[in-house]
Amino acid sequence: MRMHGSQLRASGDPYFAHPIEVAGILTEYRLDTAAIVTALLHDVIEDTAATRQEVAGMFGEEVAELVEGVTKLSKLELAAEHARQAENLRKFILAISKDVRVLLVKLADRLHNMRTLHFIDKPEKRERIARETVDIYAPLARSIGVHRICSELEELAFAHLNPTARDAIVRRLEILRSEQGRTVSLVSGEILSRLEAAGVNARVYGREKQPYSIWRKLQRKSVAFSQLADIYAFRVIVDEEDDCYRALGVIHRAWPNVPDRFKDYISTPKRNNYRSLHTTIVGPRGMRIEMQIRTEVMDRVAEEGVAAHWRYKDRNYGFDPEAAGADGGRDPLMNLRHLVQVLEHGGDAEELVEHAKLEMFMDQVFVFTPKGELISLPKGAMPLDFAYAVHTNVGDTTVGAKINGELRPLRTVLQNGDVVEIIRGAKPVTPPDWRSLTVTGRARSAIRRHIRLTEREEFVRLGRAAIDQAFSRAGKARADVSLRPAFDRFAVPGEEELYEAVGRGRVAPSLVLEAVFPGLKESERAAAAARTRIEDGRSARLYVRGGGLTPGVSLHFADCCSPVPGDRIVGILQSGEGLAVHTIDCPRLAEYEDQEEVWRDLHWTPQADNTISRARLSATIRNAPGVLGQACTLIGEAGGNIANLRMHHRQSDFFDVDFDIDVLDAKHLTHIAAALRACPSVETVDRTKG
C-alpha cells in the first residue's frame, strides 16, 4: 500500500486493491505462503520505486525471485512486433517450466484484470488484451489443468471479442433452460437412484456448457446449435477409482450408449493430468446425455490442475507423487516442457509463436513404441510427429514407418492404440515437403531448422517481386531509384537482406515505398497497400511457395477445392499442366495416393495475408419471411462481402442457398460460418469447394 500510494486503476479503485484481489484468487487454490506474498507484491518492482533488493531484504530471496519472474512476464503483448512477442514468450515458458507458481500468479493477475476490463475506455486496448488472453493465457491455464481459471478467462474474453455471437448463444441457452431446466434435475435424480440401487455411493449433478465452448464447437464442427448433444452434461462423482467403472457399468446397462462416444482418460490421462471416464447415452426421456464419471480427487485435479498436487518437499516446490496418491498420474508440467523443446530449435519469432500455440491447443491421441512406452500426441498426428516426440535424432533420420507391423506412408494419421516403429536411415534427410506431414510444434520447428538455410533464395525472389508490385501500383519503378533510404530505416545491410525481410513478411512492401519516396500522396500510398485479389495464372507464384517451385513450372489453383489463405495446401505435379495447388483434404488427392513423386509441399507466402479470396458457403435455411436478409446481415457484420448467391431445393419448410463470399482467409471464412450457425433460422452451414 505504501509503494503503490495514490495510484488508481481504470475503475477508480486504489491500485493496491488489485494485488489483494489476485492474492484472494490464489487462496482459493490453497497455495503456499510464498505464492500468496508474491501475489500481493507482483506489481511493486514494475510499477513503483521498489527494487528487487528491497523485496529480498523484507520478504526473503524466494519471494524476490518469484516477484521478479512475474515482472519479466508482464509485457507479453500480442500487439507488439513479432520479435518482442517471441522473446517474451521465450522468457515466459522458461520461467514457468522452472517454477509453476510464477504462472499461477500471472494467471490470477490476468483473471482479475479481465474481470475489470470493461473499465478501460479504449475499445482497441480492450480487444488487444482479450485477444492476448484467449491466445496465450487461457491455453496455458488449460495446459496445466487449471480448468476453472481457463474457462472464466475464455468467457470474459469472448464477451469483448465477439459480443454479438455471445449474446445470440446466451439467448438460445435461456430458451433451452426454460424448456429443459426441470428435465435436468429429474434426470439427475433418476441416474442417482439407479446408482444407489446398485450400491454405488455417488453424487450427480448437471452442468451447462459455457457460451465460448459452444462457439468453439460451432466453429470446429459443421453442425447447428440444435444438433449439439452436450449443451447439458452430467457429472458423476464417486469415492474410489473402481467405483468409476462400476458406475459406468450401471449406466450402460440402464440406458443405451452412443457408439464411438466413450473415452477412458483414467487409464490414459491427458497431458495436463486430467483423468475421467466420458460416455454419451440416450438417457431418461430420450434425452441424449454426455456424462463424466470421476472420483473427488480427479474432480479437484480437473478443476485446479497443478495446484492440486504441488507442495513444498525437500526445499523444492514441485509435483509430489505421494500427495497425488493413487489418482496422481504424472507431472502436469510435462506439457510445458514440450514447449521448452520447441525453444531449443530456435527459428524466427513468427515460427516460435506459431509452434508454441500449436503445442498449447492440442487434443490427444495415444500411441505406443514397440517396447510398449506410451506416447501422447495431438489428434491428426502422423509418424514424423511420433518420431520427433521420441527424440530429435530419431525424427531427423526417419525414412519410413511401420504401424501395427505394416509399412505405411508417412502421411498416415495415427489412431489411438497404434504401435509405431520408425525406420531410420544412416544420416539426416529432411525433404521440404515433410512440413505438411506433421502437426506438432516440436516436429515442425525441428524440420524448419534443417531447411531454413535453403529457403533464403526463394524469400529474396518473393520480396523483390512484392516490392516491384508495390512500386508499380504507385506508378513508380524500382530500377530508377536507390533503395538505400530503406536500408537505414529497416536496419538491413543491403538489397538482398531487404528483399528477404519483405519475402518473409517482416517488412511490408508499402513501407519500403514510403521510405524511398517520403512525400508520397495518399492515393499512391493507398494503391500500394491495397489488398489484391488472388487470381489464377502467373500471379499465383506470389502467394504460394514451397518444394517444387522451380523456374519454368507454371502454378495454378485447382478448381476442385478452391484454396484460400490459411488452408493447408499441397501441390500435385501434372505432366504438361504444371503444379496444381490443392487443399490437404481435397478428395481428388486420393487419385495420387501411390504416386509419391508428384507430391510437393506448399505453403502461403506473407503476401497472401494482404489479399482477398472468394469462397463458397452452402446453408440450409428455414423458409420464413426475412430469414435470408438476416443471414446476409450476419455475413456483412462478420466482415464478409457477398459476391453472389443462388437459391435451390426450395421446399415449404426449408431451402438451400449458396453464398459466394469475398474473405480474407480460411479463419475469416470459419468465423462467418460460425456466426451463421448461431442463428436459430439456419439449420446447417458447410463450406463448398470447387
Image (cartoon, helix red, strand yellow):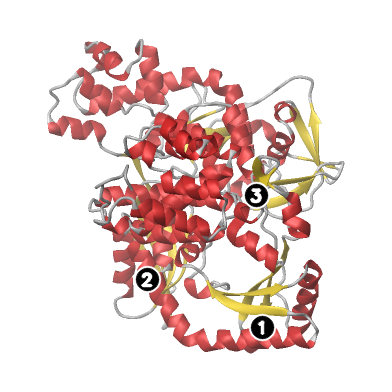
Amino acid type for the residue under numbered disc 3: Arg
Residue 540: x %, y % from top left: 42, 33
Q: Quadrant of residue 190?
A: bottom right
Residue drawn 74% across and 39% down? 409
Q: Relative to 511, is 397 on the left or the right?
A: right
- The residues bearing labels 1 and 2 have C-alpha atoms spaced at a distance of 28 Å
Residue drawn 53% across and 51% down? 141
Local packing at callout 3 (Cα closer than 10 Å; few below 14, some 14-19, many 20+) is some
Res. 168 mark: 2
Q: Are marks 3 and 2 in contact (CB under 8 Å)?
A: no
Q: Quadrant of residue 245?
A: bottom right
Q: Are marks 1 and 2 in contact (CB under 8 Å)?
A: no
Res. 311 mark: 3
Q: Quadrant of residue 396?
A: top right
Q: Earlier in the sequence, mark 3 or mark 2?
A: 2
Residue 219: x %, y % from top left: 48, 59
Amino acid type for the residue under numbered disc 2: Ala
Q: Earlier in the sequence, mark 1 or mark 2?
A: 2
Q: Relative to 46, is 340 on the left or the right?
A: right
Q: Earlier in the sequence, mark 1 or mark 3?
A: 1
Local packing at callout 2 (Cα closer than 10 Å; few below 14, some 14-19, many 20+) is some
Q: Are marks 1 and 3 in contact (CB under 8 Å)?
A: no
The relative height of residue 525 versus residue 76 in the rendered view (above or below) is above
Residue indicated by mark 1? 283
The relative height of residue 232 versus residue 327 in the rendered view (above or below) is below
Residue closer to the observer: 124 or 366: 124
Residue 2: x %, y % from top left: 32, 45
Residue 286: x %, y % from top left: 63, 86
Residue at disc 3, secondary structure: strand
